Image (cartoon, helix red, strand yellow):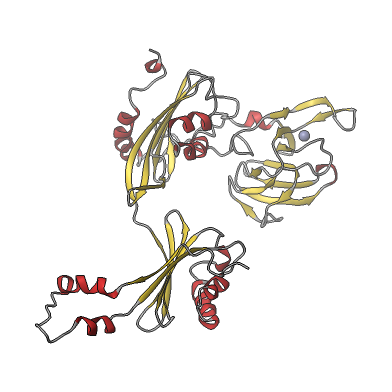
Amino acid sequence: MTLPRCNAVFTSLICAALFFTFLPRSTGFVPESGSIREDDILRTLPQIEVVQGSFKPNATLVATLVDFDIPSELAHSVARLVQPVFDVRGFRSGNAFTLEKDTDGNLRAFEYKISDDKILEVQRGAEAYEAKVSSLDLESRETTITSEITPAQNSLYAALAKEDRQAVQLAEKVASIFAWDVDFNTGLHPDDRIRIVVPALYHEGQFVKWGDIQAAELLNAGKTYRAFRYEGSYYDTKGNALKRALLASPLPFNPRITSGFSRRRMHPILGTSRPHLAVDYGAPTGTPVQAVAKGIVTFAGWDAGYGNLVQIKHSRGLTTGYAHLSRIAAGVRVGRAIDQGAGVGSVGQTGLATGPHLHFMMTKDGKAINPRTMQSEPPIPIDSKLLPLFLAHISPMEAKLGIAGYTALKK
Ligand SMILES: [Zn+2]
């Protein structure tokens, strides 16, 4: 038998005398000698009980509140109040909360930490309870991180992890910025270097998370790539958008290609020579698959040897197909619009497949084409009216990245 409050960290009575100590200073109230006694003030000040705890696995908000002696009726009305501002199914086991109660058991306030920088607050107002989600005040400290690819740290993750415990969280952001130009899975080499200018966000002296990368430089295989954030998008030094009409890969972190596009190859299961008009990416079951461009879903379901298949029609006569999926993402249905980078499903081995992989197909004007040849699309330049503003914006960032160029690295 476990105690119902086993997850409470501590329970404390805030001594009203503490309030009393500060009362004269904070209110300017000076008691006339003998006219008001300390006991009287203590009696009139509310006594508050503060309980801190964390959500138990599979516990609902109502059950958690009831666990802490909040009447079930009130717990239900709090849940109804919370629902419009925060989905009550979103409470995560282990996440911390704080409850404030009067000594007569009335709920004064409930606070729940939704994420690193968001909290849910329920408070008793003059008339009724109020619920809202608010963000923590975060202090931004600009940080420059430089990381080198070495034989021992030969991936973006490894190189950043060596630099700083938190920096590893930037790996995916960096990869997505340069995803149109660099294959991070196979394309990094010793002596490559990454430099990032990014705000680190702190709350009360504690690191909370990284903000958006403001500038980044990648020295890769003899080339220098630079990216600058402007109005929510990334551009190179000349103001060309890094984002292209097509993503370099339907999988994050450009994975291994296990079978390339070929007009003629031996089929691993059928044992006969058949063309392979697609690219196979080996990846573990469950790896998210993303739409390489925005479009309209034209097929989503089972198709014989393809297993679970999603097909999307894009502009300029292009279509893409994603086969052998273990599952198709919710909301991916025929006729629905889908954004570039949106999830179409997960890697699997449904249909005719020897192992988990994504069979990725592309057609142009009805003919199968090699997706790998479609990657180099001309960049889209920034609006010419914005260019002077953009150039002024990036000039201090360029200074932070340092003297440009691969040669500068060579000692
Ligand atoms: Zn294939």
Of 219 and 241, which appears nearest the observer? Answer: 219
Relative depth, front residue between 192 and 260: 192
Classify 96 as above or below 64.
above
* 32 relative position to 122: left or right: left
Find ligand 1 in the image and state its quadrant.
Answer: top right
Q: Quadrant of the N terminus?
A: bottom right
Relative to 224, residue 81 above or below:
below
- Please tell me which residue is depicted at 44% across the width and 53% down the height of the picture: 116
Furthest residue toward left: 33
The residue nearer to you, when weighing 120 against 188, is 120
Image height check: is 343 above or below 119?
Answer: above
Place of residue 218 in the rendered image (x, y in percent of width and height, measured from the top left)? 45, 27
Residue at the image position 66 percent from the left and 43 percent from the top? 289
Q: Is residue 159 above or below residue 304?
A: above
Q: Residue 216's spot in the image, x, y percent?
A: 41, 33
Looking at the image, which is closer to me, 316 or 309?
Answer: 309
Q: Residue 366 location, x and y as percent? A: 74, 39
Residue 361 point in image, percent of width and height:
72, 37
Judge left or right: residue 267 versus residue 42. Answer: right
Quadrant holding the C terminus: top left
Which quarter of the figure has residue 117?
Answer: bottom left
